[in-house]
């Protein structure tokens, strides 16, 4: 069967509708470009009731919000899919346990993420200069700062001006007041001698325009907001681009297979499978923007082979897929006896932490690991869902009394311990390694006939030692907060509780940027060294990831790359 | 489109083929305010609707098993002066569904009920559900207290623990259970910090320097403006 050709040739084909694809859509369509956005999942708008999970009660779901293979983070989480996508597998090499979270839907993973929106600081772009590991970025904070500023104002973020050198301030909306368990954390952190400041989340505590509503404090940002009061790519970038009169055509359920090229190796568009009729189509475009997520973009590039690009598009360096890295993670929980039998009131707040601890030891010479981590805080009287009430009185082992039983005393047990926990999680920077990578698994295809990714990933001693430091810190701060630590402290046998690579869902680095085409895949404007009309606007071009969540930097770099793309088209360079 | 129709359309493959430009744009030009549910669904994709439909149509637990579960549910969580029992909160229906939806529950629940009946028959000459409450209590006391269970009753203990977990989670995720628990959220509101009486109860307070940074609920609907340095000018 022949591949059906699109009637027209778009100015730009944008593959992926998450943070990077959404920003490219907004900037390029505002500039008058005719863009096609290809998304591998269905349309999604949280304001339309058929998609809405926000403000639903647990009993509206027959499984009471439990997670499943269809939604890894539960029935009410906005992200379709997750750790498994039916019919779209990936494989792991020997001794690798890589986890890959994918969400097939308009807006991708931005629909459910934690909205923690931290700028990289000046040190974060130049870590090799400090510890000799990995590589420096070809750009620095000053190159990106104007774009961080613009992202803050366009999308909205709350936070506070703190003048901490490597935690740059931005254009902040005011933060919400801390919750009760967060006051306990603040007290613990003060005693332990570590800083704690208001968190920085892309949630509208204050109005920023007439198109989006304000946060109404349901604590459910992971369910996507019907008032558009938090950042997701559909609600804050793609819909506004359409409303602005932009020429934006959405191709949903369109699974991109490869980038097509002409005889000279220049991109001519993309081939995709329409998931509804299972047929292959060719969409013609003058420029291709890949923003399918770091690993999906690497997969598309490696599956795009022609006579000019024999090892895959953009892969003359052999580095596409390499330097894959995720954040480190570790957690600990404590029971706070003073919070037992607490008064009830609505403390849902915003959909995430109101306070956090930024990395505080940049100047320390005594650490046995490089880079750092920040600490996230959780707890409170949340809405019950499947799993609530399990092992209702296990804490009696600590404070005395029978475990188990039956009858009305169970009500008292459940109520006593409700909201009496304080948890902390570290999120840290790993060191990018060339030997951690994804490649095409030639033996396996997905249900669309496209060869899948195979992962190879090992943590190094750097990440393990960092996790050990996290555990020591967690103990100190939770005990200082008046907590009784729960569970055993994970030791060396368990890598100090270090999460498996991929589990923090911050995978970056597969198409890293640099000035030298032999050691990098894109230039400092996210443009492939090997193919001038292909740009990578997801987290693939990250040289290193900082201990910061990547989304705000994806957005800033996608805006910067889009400006460069516009300029290059105007100058007729591409 | 109701659940059944949507399933039918999927099976018939009547989804539009060919070019799939979805000219969809957001339904509302202005930000919507939270409102009551307009549809019966809970935000499912077609794939999820088909899964739910399949589960609803399956039968796993038989009448006897469901009756035994109902008896156990109300032993675990009877009514009190203010709230109904687990069965009055609809817990057996939840268990009936979840055992189908999570196949890992199936063998332990079925085998556990059979274990309970075997034990009841041996001890009292009748299935568990027909025993009088005092006899039922005697058996439960043997298997309801982890750490105190005789080795030969451990399978019963595992089963009882599973039933306790499912009963409590079913109850506290029901409308009655959420009310009983006292959860106050899941409604639009204007968070302005921990109530003063709670702060006092816990001997904690907000630092003034911290409070000065926080949002003013009264003026937050004004559109934010900043100076060139990023200082917020209004609020």
Image (cartoon, rainbow, N blue to C red):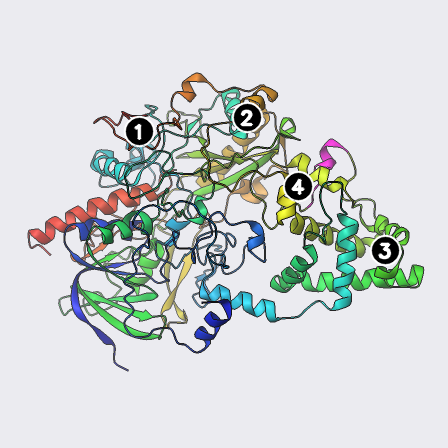
Closest to the camera, between mark 3 and mark 1, is 1
In the image, the segment drawn in magenta is: A391-400
Closest to the camera, between mark 2 and mark 3, is 2
Residue for badge 3: B152
Considering the numbered disc 4 on the image, is that residue within a helix, a strand or a loop? helix
Closest to the camera, between mark 3 and mark 4, is 4
Packing grade of label 1 (10 A; few <14, some 14-19, many >=20) is many
Residue for badge 1: A169
Q: Is residue B91 visible?
A: yes
For marks 3 and 4, give the CA distance. 37 Å
Q: Chain of mark 1?
A: A
Say whether marks 1 and 2 touch (CB < 8 Å). Answer: no
Determine which of the numbered discs, if any, sits on residue B13 in the image. none
Work out whether residue A524 or residue A68 is closer to the camera in this orientation and state it: A68
Considering the numbered disc 3 on the image, is that residue within a helix, a strand or a loop? helix
Q: Is residue A525 visible?
A: no
Residue for badge 2: A184
The residue that appears at 73% across and 61% down in the rendered structure is: B109
Do tags 3 and 1 sit on the same chain?
A: no
Do tags 1 and 2 sit on the same chain?
A: yes
Q: Position of residue B122 (x, y in %)?
A: 92, 62
Q: Chain of mark 2?
A: A
For marks 3 and 1, give the CA distance. 64 Å
Closest to the camera, between mark 1 and mark 4, is 4
């Amino acid at each position: 069967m022949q591949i059906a050709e699109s009637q027209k040739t778009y100015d730009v084909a944008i593959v992926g509708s998450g943070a990077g694809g959404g920003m490219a859509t907004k900037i390029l369509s505002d500039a008058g470009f005719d863009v096609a956005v290809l998304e591998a999942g269905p349309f999604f708008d949280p304001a339309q009731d058929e998609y809405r999970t926000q403000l639903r009660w647990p009993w509206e779901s027959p499984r009471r919000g439990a997670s499943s293979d269809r939604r890894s983070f539960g029935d009410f989480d906005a992200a379709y899919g997750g750790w498994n996508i039916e019919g779209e597998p990936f494989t792991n090499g020997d001794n690798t346990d890589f986890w890959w979270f994918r969400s097939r839907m308009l807006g991708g993973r931005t629909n459910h993420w934690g909205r923690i929106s931290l700028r990289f600081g000046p040190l974060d772009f130049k870590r090799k200069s400090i510890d000799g590991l990995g590589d420096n970025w070809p750009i620095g904070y000053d190159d990106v700062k104007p774009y961080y500023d613009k992202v803050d104002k366009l999308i909205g973020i709350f936070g506070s001006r703190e003048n901490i050198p490597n935690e740059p301030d931005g254009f902040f909306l005011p933060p919400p007041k801390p919750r009760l368990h967060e006051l306990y954390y603040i007290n613990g952190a003060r005693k332990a001698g570590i800083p704690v400041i208001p968190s920085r989340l892309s949630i509208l505590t204050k109005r920023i325009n007439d198109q989006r509503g304000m946060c109404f404090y349901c604590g459910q940002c992971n369910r996507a907001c019907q008032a558009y009061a938090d950042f997701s790519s559909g609600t804050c970038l793609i819909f506004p681009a359409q409303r602005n009169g932009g020429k934006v055509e959405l191709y949903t359920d369109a699974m991109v297979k490869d980038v097509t090229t002409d005889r000279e190796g220049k991109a001519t568009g993309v081939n995709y499978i329409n998931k509804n009729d299972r047929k292959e189509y060719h969409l013609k475009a003058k420029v291709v923007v890949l923003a399918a997520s770091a690993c999906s973009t690497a997969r598309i590039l490696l599956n795009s082979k022609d006579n000019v690009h024999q090892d895959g598009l953009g892969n003359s360096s052999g580095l596409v897929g390499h330097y894959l890295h995720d954040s480190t993670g570790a957690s600990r929980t404590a029971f706070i006896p003073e919070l037992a039998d607490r008064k009830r009131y609505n403390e849902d707040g915003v959909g995430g932490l109101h306070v956090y601890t930024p990395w505080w030891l940049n100047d320390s010479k005594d650490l046995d690991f490089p880079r750092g981590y920040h600490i996230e805080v959780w707890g409170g009287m949340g809405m019950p869902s499947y799993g609530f009430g399990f092992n209702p009185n296990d804490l009696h082992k600590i404070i005395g009394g029978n475990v188990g039983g039956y009858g009305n005393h169970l009500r008292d047990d459940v109520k006593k311990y409700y909201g009496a926990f304080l948890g902390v999680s570290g999120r840290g920077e790993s060191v990018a390694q060339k030997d951690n990578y994804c490649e095409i698994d030639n033996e396996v295809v997905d249900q669309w006939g496209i060869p899948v990714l195979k992962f190879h990933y090992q943590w190094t001693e750097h990440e393990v030692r960092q996790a050990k430091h996290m555990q020591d810190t967690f103990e100190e701060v939770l005990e200082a907060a008046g907590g009784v630590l729960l569970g055993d402290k994970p030791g060396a046998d368990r890598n100090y509780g270090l999460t498996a690579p991929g589990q923090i869902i911050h995978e970056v680095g597969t198409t890293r940027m640099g000035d030298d085409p032999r050691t990098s895949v894109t230039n400092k404007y996210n443009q492939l060294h090997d193919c001038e009309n292909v740009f990578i606007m997801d987290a693939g071009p990250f040289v290193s990831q900082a201990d910061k969540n990547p989304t705000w930097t994806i957005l800033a770099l996608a805006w910067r790359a889009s400006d460069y793309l516009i300029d290059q088209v105007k100058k007729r360079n591409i | 489109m109701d659940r059944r129709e949507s399933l039918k359309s999927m099976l018939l493959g009547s989804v539009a083929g060919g070019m799939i430009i979805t000219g969809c744009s957001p339904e509302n030009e202005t930000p919507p305010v939270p409102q009551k549910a307009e549809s019966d669904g809970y935000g499912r994709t077609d794939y999820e609707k088909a899964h739910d439909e399949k589960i609803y149509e399956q039968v796993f637990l038989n009448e006897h098993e469901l009756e035994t579960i109902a008896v156990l549910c109300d032993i675990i969580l009877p009514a009190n002066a203010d709230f109904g029992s687990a069965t009055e909160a609809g817990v057996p229906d939840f268990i009936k569904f979840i055992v189908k939806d999570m196949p890992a529950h199936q063998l332990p629940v079925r085998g556990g009920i059979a274990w309970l009946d075997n034990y009841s028959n041996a001890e009292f000459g009748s299935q568990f559900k027909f025993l009088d409450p005092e006899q039922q209590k005697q058996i439960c006391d043997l298997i309801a207290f982890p750490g105190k269970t005789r080795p030969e009753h451990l399978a019963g203990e595992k089963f009882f623990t599973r039933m306790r977990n499912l009963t409590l989670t079913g109850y506290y995720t029901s409308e009655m259970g959420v009310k009983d628990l006292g959860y106050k959220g899941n409604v639009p509101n204007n968070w302005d910090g921990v109530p003063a009486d709670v702060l006092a109860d816990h001997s904690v307070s907000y630092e003034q320097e911290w409070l000065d940074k926080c949002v003013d609920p009264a003026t937050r609907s004004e559109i934010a403006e900043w100076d060139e340095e990023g200082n917020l000018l209004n609020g």
